Image (spheres, grey):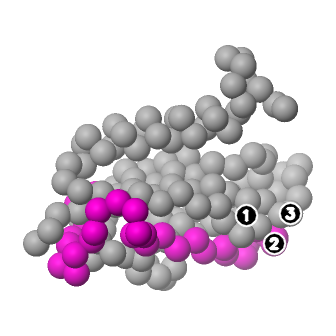
Amino acid sequence: MNTAWCGLPCGTLATAAVLILAAGAAWAGGGQAWTRDQVSQGLQAQGRAVVVRYEPGPRGPAVPDGARITQVYASRDYSSTAQVATDLCWGSERGPCVPLAGRSIETHAFDGRAARGPVLLVHRVEHWVNDHPPLFIRGTVTVWFDER
């Protein structure tokens, strides 16, 4: 098992980091929120998009029909040297979308849109560098909303 300097499995550290970032973002966003954590299908080809759809589920607060987004947090994590472009989109992969610069983003780009989404992470391998397919990407999306 690959372990980090503190002796914990690396996946545990990555999960803890995501939860800490999401907790900080939750404090900033206020109101109610839903969060989903999913792993993409394997990315197989350079330039070919893999779309992961995020929507409220059975756990967490109910999202009323009239609820509107007040903030969105998204993160991605993968073990590869591949260069991956990821867009955070609302509604469909055609957007509106905002690019993730780095591993995460907090944005108000979707404020006022329906909180039920869907919200999507759209991943594309730009260059494999020293790696090869398939590449799986773990994503987390948190949507804060107000009931209007």
The residues tagged by marks 3 and 2 sit, at their Cα atoms, a distance apart of 7 Å
The residue that disc 3 covers is 133
Which region is colored magenta?
43-71
The residues tagged by marks 1 and 3 sit, at their Cα atoms, a distance apart of 10 Å
Q: Are marks 1 and 3 in contact (CB under 8 Å)?
A: yes
Q: Position of residue 31 (x, y in %)?
A: 19, 54
The residue that disc 2 covers is 45
Q: Residues within 10 Å of mark 1 (few under 14, many from 20)?
A: many
Q: What residue type is labelled 2?
A: Ala
Q: Nearer the viewer, residue 27 or 61?
A: 61
Q: Which of 53 and 95 is in front in this view?
A: 53
Q: Position of residue 99 (x, y in %)?
A: 49, 61
Q: Where is residue 81 in the image (x, y as percent from the top left)?
A: 78, 46
* Numbered label attached to residue 148: none
Q: Can residue 147 be seen in this view?
A: yes
Sequence order check, earlier mark of 1 and 3? 1
Is residue 37 shown left or right of residue 12?
A: left
